[in-house]
Amino acid sequence: MGMLALLAGVGLALANGANDNCKGVATLIGGRVISQVKALRLAHATTFLGCLASVLVARGLIHAFQGNGMLPEELAGDRSLLTIVGAAAAATILLATWLRLPVSTTHALIGALVGAGLGASGTVLWGGLLSKFLIPLLLSPLVGAVLAGGAYRVLHRLRLAMGVSEETCVCVGESRAWIPVRELAGAAECDPSLGSGLSACVHAQAGVSAVSVHVGREDECRQRYQGQVLGVSAASLLDTAHGFSASLTSFARGMNDAPKLAAIVIGITAWSSAGPAVAIGLVAVAMAVGGILGARRVEPTMSEGITSMNAGSAATANGVAAVLVIMASLWALPVSTTHVTCGAIFGIGAAHRQARGRMIGGILLAWGATLPAAALIALGLTALL
């Protein structure tokens, strides 16, 4: 049982990394700020640092995700039961990752705890489940959506008041250089020796000898900012803010998720006497490995499927999500980083009326299915074992 238990805990951390590591940096990829490879490297590194920082705030979440407040006292922290919980949650998340769906590890854990509790004793403390777990889970994405949508409107008006305007860029040539449309508007601005027309202008601006044209959706054109803020290019300033907010979101995710997974590892390996540091260290490594192996599968859904965003709206969504998740970690609230992040992106999409309803509906359906799916798997494993 000891080796099986350890495999269940590590497997859950691997599955979490594969499904979740891309979520903080998805907007960097969707906005073409940096490449997918660089963005995911940034995500793995900052998530790992967030996991290590979670040692400072871990005890409350570890206590909750060993079943305290949800399961009868005699079952909370039971090694055999937590092994089943880890295996059921890992299976649920891996299935969602294979389907390219960004789901909640918190949902999977809660569902698995409910299923294992029902299978072991037929009893779950429904009052504690509702007040300590489900209410924070249900409210957090709504709060994220409202705050992100409101912040976007305020910052949008502030940008206009400061005289910073948007410009649309097109991508040309093999290097995929982004060239502002205004710079391609007149061939007269190009080097006369190169001839006239769009091809010559592109040659002058991007240094390419031929132009390839891709016809796609209107929202695939990249929106950047023209103007300066305190003498600094608005586009560069917002790209920097975007990168910082994405890093902070990944850090917050590691900080919030690592204690939940460590709760399983501590319970199933009897490491509680050594404190959470060893278990969190193991979880941090496993999450990083899982992200390296599988994060590319879910990334397109998060970066392009929900809504189109420019640097300003993406930085707003990430900043709101990061602050909410860090606050929840400090208060030991079992929120879902996936819910908060997606909720903030939903809010941005609603604010500029470019949310993609079909994709959002699919994500919401996956969220709703995660908890009962994990519960059924845990219930079946309890019956078998």
Image: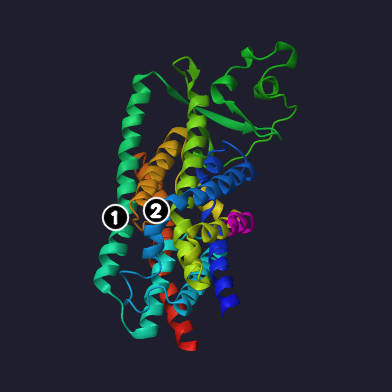
- Do tag 1 and tag 2 residues touch (Cβ < 8 Å)? no
Mark 2 lies on a secondary structure that is helix
Query: Observer-nearest residue: 145 or 276?
Result: 276
Q: Which residue is drawn at the image coordinates 48% and 62% (left, top)?
A: 262
Label 2 crowd bin: few (<14), some (14–19), many (20+), radius 10 Å: some
Alpha carbon distance from label 1 to label 2: 20 Å
Q: Identify the magenta region.
A: 285-295
* Left or right: 271, with 288 as reference point: left
Does residue 289 belong to the magenta stretch?
Answer: yes
User: In the rendered image, which residue does mark 1 sit on?
Assistant: 139
Q: Nearer the viewer, mark 1 or mark 2?
A: 1
- Name the amino acid type tagged 2: Gly
Q: Which residue is mark 2?
A: 357
Q: Identify whether 283 is placed above or below 22.
A: below
Q: Residue at x 54, y 64 (%)?
A: 99
Q: Position of residue 122 (x, y in %)?
A: 33, 84
Where is the N terminus found, in terms of image quarters?
Answer: bottom right
- Residue 5: % across, % down: 55, 75
In this view, 112 is above or below 344: below
Which residue extends farthest front? 273
